[in-house]
Amino acid sequence: MQQFDRGSTCTCAALVTGVKVEIWSDVVCPWCYIGKRRFEAALREFPHPVELEWKSFQLDPHARSQPAGANVARLAEKYGRSLAEAQQMVDGVTAAAAGEGLEFRLDLAQSGNTFDAHRLLHLAKAHGVQDALKERFDRAYFTEGERIDDSAVLTRLAAELDLDAAEVLTSDAYAEAVRSDVAEARALGISGVPFFVIDRKYGVSGAQPADLVRQALQQAWDEQPVDLVAADACDDDACAV
């Protein structure tokens, strides 16, 4: 678990309201979806409030649309592996996903640029449904074979959560927010996803087991300052008896 330096800012009177978790993730990252399930399992065993925010990260900012069935060949080329070795990689991550109750159909997956999807996740954040849209995008890509860079698909998926994607997709809305998340990841030294930042103090890299994530959450909670709540008290000798 990586520890961040939060500086010397005094928090001696801060109110303990919950643990803040920021997760850098991409919607075409298989381990991000697996990590999401493991994080959710950790939350079920964590008895304190958690504030969650999904942060944008693009594994390939220059990605172009790829047809279904192209992932194995693309992985083989990217990592210098044979097609058989690349298929083993796909089979391995599919099995890991199944272990978390997820059905991966990477034979149907159609890779593409995720910039617009991330813009819509910022729209969803503004409307309080960011986690729900993240889940919907992940399922659409990994299980349903939806094209994640297609405006019509994104609009339809967003509409399921009563979001008007057109106002974003026909403008530059939230583009700077996506770029800011990516720049922030670089500043924090994040080079791979998923990456969990807890209270801006601890970093957990990768789709770690739920128990490890829960321990990190608990450690962050235990180290939060206690709120100094006003109550009846004596000041100097004002109530001496």
Image: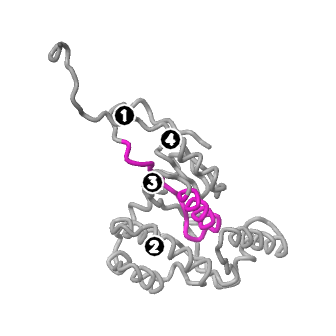
Circle 2 residues within 10 Å: few <14, some 14–19, many ≥20: many
Asked which secondary structure carries label 4, the reply is loop
Query: Which numbered disc, 4 or 2, marks the residue that appears first in the sequence?
Result: 2
Q: In the picture shown, does residue 233 fall above or below 122?
A: above
The residue that appears at 50% across and 76% down in the rendered structure is 136
Q: Which residue is mark 2?
A: 133
Q: Position of residue 50 (x, y in %)?
A: 45, 54
Residue type beneath disc 2: Leu
First-in-chain label (3 vs 4): 3
- Depth check: 152 or 160 in front? 160
Q: Which residue is mark 4?
A: 201
The label nearer to you, 4 versus 1, is 1
Distance from Cα at disc 4 to Cα at disc 2: 27 Å
- Could you say which disc has been placed on residue 50 in the image? 3
What is the CA distance from the residue labelled 1 to the residue labelled 2?
33 Å
- For the N terminus, the quadrant is top right
Q: Position of residue 81 (x, y in %)?
A: 82, 68
Give the left or right position of residue 129, taking residue 182 as reference.
left
Tell me where residue 113 appears, x and y as whole percent: 54, 73
Q: Determine whether label 3 and label 4 are within 8 Å by CB.
A: no
